[in-house]
Amino acid sequence: MYYNDHTIVYFNGKFLKANEAGMDLYGQSLHYGYSVFEGIKSYRTDHGTRIFKAEEHYERLKRSAELMHIPFDYSASELTELTYELLERNGFSDAYIRPLVTCSPNMSLSKGQKSYLSLLAWEWSNGYLADKMKIMTSGFQRPNPTAFKVEAKVGGHYVNSILACQDAKDKGYDEALLLDEHGNVAESSGANIFYEKDGTLFTPAKGSILPGITRQTVFEICDELNIPVKETFFKPEEMRGADAAFFCGTAAEIVALESLDDIPFTKGWNDTASEKVQQAYQKRVRLLSL
Ligand code: PMP
């Protein structure tokens, strides 16, 4: 699904075939999850292939590396240029791009000495999740912000995401909603969350979430469409049975939620402000005006 004999990746300073790239067995990234990465999407538009919010994603990658003390010298514009070349070499337009920064051999628990950049991409033409999702409040909390740098996108953090997401699937739900250590709603395993009440959107304030680039795009869209939006801390009880809710993220885009803990969101999706945001997002990524 992710690559075949012809797939090209950028690895360790050059473009090569995916099946010729290999990872060192003695690195901290493999053993301890000490790596940083991004999830980016490119879209076919009337003006050619466009990487959505490339600069924001690459600035976040650089910041994640900095927070982890991983040396990483590429600039956002160099990274963007390399990514366009990667897409072109593979003939991709609608694609998911996965930049990954790993560390050189070092088994000790000290900071990274040297890093390697991999840029991977695969075609991704249809939406991630077309249907409304049934979600459950997870028993797994988000990583505690005093134990991890939660605003960084770090490989090891996603062990928590895998545990929560698989647990939700095993229980018959599509996704997990994770809380912070105070019992406030935080986010899903890989997306931010909003709910809607009386025409206003609410989303968890920063603290225990990855502050998503899509979340920021939702704020921009709400500003343009005059939809009131509030960043605040709230419990799952406050959003159960609300008018509507959605997950947002680069991969998920804007995906409507059907229910939380089997309690449905009550308004018809097409009558909500959330649906307007979803439509506007689709236009934005393809450079169409609102
Ligand atoms: N939270 C988590 C835990 C994520 O993995 C993601 C996906 N990167 C998001 C939120 C959404 O972030 P973005 O909109 O930048 O993709």
Image (cartoon, rainbow, N blue to C red):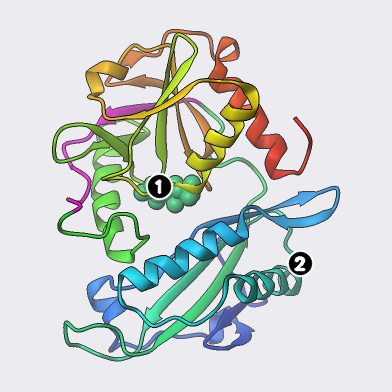
Compared with residue 202, is residue 76 higher up or lower down, i.e. above or below?
Answer: below
Local secondary structure at mark 1:
loop
Q: Is residue 158 covered in magenta?
A: no
> Quarter of the image holding residue 184?
top left
For the residue pair 120 and 181, the one nearer the viewer reads as 181
Disc 2 Cβ-to-ligand 1 distance below 8 Å: no
- Residue 259 drawn above or below residue 248: above
Picture layout, residue 150 above or below residue 106 = above
Assess whether mark 2 and mark 1 are in contact (beta carbons under 8 angstroms). no
Q: Which mark is residue 91?
A: 2
Q: Amino acid at mark 1?
A: Pro
Considering depth in this image, is 75 or 1 the residue closer to the camera?
Answer: 75
Residue 45, percent across and down? 80, 48
**Span shown in magenta:** 132-145
How many residues crowd around disc 2 within 10 Å: few (fewer than 14), some, or many (20 or more)? few
Q: Is residue 136 magenta?
A: yes
Q: Residue at x 58, y 70 (%)?
A: 76
Q: Residue at x 39, y 83 (%)?
A: 71
**Left or right of residue 225, residue 257 in this image:** left
Q: Is residue 250 left or right of residue 152?
A: right
Assign a secondary structure to mark 2: loop
Q: Residue furthest right?
A: 46
Give the mark toward the camera: 1 or 2.
1
Q: Is residue 219 left or right of residue 162?
A: right
